[in-house]
Image: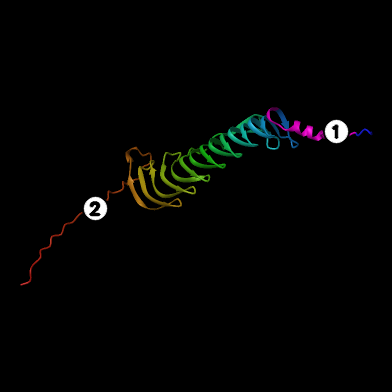
């Protein structure tokens, strides 16, 4: 009886190699072909958990949480200073689907920054913006612009309190001219006051008051008495 030899079922080597390449758990630094590098936790071959990613082309760095290969959770994004070589913080806060989402602080410059709510990478919700010239806006945001109720305080302490739309004063609001000792209250349309009243307010403490005070407007009530006579 002839001896029949059956071939053994041997998995090809590439399957074993691929299985070993599937990254899960804590790993050492993994380098990409373009020079980017990631050090941290993995799940099902995706960045998942805590880790640090360095972009070679932009010399930027992210340290924080990941979910399914995207920045999600709390993390800090920094860029490298070309002069000192040190990393300078740009954004620190919450992320979702690789975009700023939730509460966080973004530094435009070392003198200008925003702290507050984000949605899909844009300032949305409540937040406070500090400008380099000394102005401060505090209030609601919508799609990266002032939107809703908020207060803009200028560097000279004058301020506007009221409604905003697409970054402009729009709707009912008050503008305090503290340097002149006056207050305007009324309706605004696209940054232009359309209808309202101007009154003196704190003229004694104003740094540059108007030459003459605004006269007080009063309503005078006049009563008419009419005698009715019956026809003869």
Please provide percent x and percent y for residue 104. 53, 35
Q: Residue placed at 79% from the left, 35% from the top?
A: 15
Residue pointed to by mark 1: 8
- Residue 219 is labelled as 2
Which quadrant is the N terminus positioned in?
A: top right
Residue 80 can be seen, yes or no: no
Which secondary structure lies at badge 2?
loop
Tell me if 1 is positioned left or right of 184 in this view: right
Q: Position of residue 37 (x, y in %)?
A: 71, 32
Tell whether 128 sits left or right of 90: left
Q: Position of residue 165 (x, y in %)?
A: 47, 49
C-alpha span from label 1 to label 2? 107 Å
Q: Is residue 103 magenta?
A: no
- Magenta range is 5-27
Horizontal side of 159 relative to 215 (left or right) equals: right
Q: Residue furthest front?
A: 1
Task: State yes or no: residue 18 in magenta.
Answer: yes
């Amino acid at each position: 009886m002839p001896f029949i030899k059956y071939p053994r079922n041997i998995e090809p080597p590439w399957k074993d190699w691929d299985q070993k390449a599937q990254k899960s758990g804590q790993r050492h630094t993994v380098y990409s072909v373009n020079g980017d590098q990631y050090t941290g936790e993995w799940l099902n071959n995706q960045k998942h958990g805590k880790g640090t990613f360095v972009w070679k082309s932009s010399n930027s760095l992210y340290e924080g949480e990941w979910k399914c290969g995207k920045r999600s959770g709390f993390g800090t994004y920094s860029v490298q200073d070309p002069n000192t070589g040190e990393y300078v913080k740009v954004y620190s806060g919450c992320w979702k689907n690789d975009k700023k989402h939730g509460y966080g602080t973004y530094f435009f410059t070392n003198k200008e920054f925003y702290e507050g709510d984000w949605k899909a990478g844009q300032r949305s919700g409540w937040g406070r913006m500090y400008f380099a010239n000394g102005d401060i806006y505090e209030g609601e945001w919508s799609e990266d612009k002032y939107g809703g109720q908020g207060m803009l305080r200028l560097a000279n302490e004058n301020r506007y309190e009221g409604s905003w739309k697409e970054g402009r004063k729009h709707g009912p609001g008050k503008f305090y001219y503290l340097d002149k000792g006056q207050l305007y209250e009324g309706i605004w349309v696209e940054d232009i006051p359309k209808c309202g009243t101007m009154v003196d307010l704190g003229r004694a403490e104003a740094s540059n008051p108007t030459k003459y005070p605004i006269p007080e407007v009063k309503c005078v009530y006049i009563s008419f008495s009419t005698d009715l006579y019956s026809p003869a």
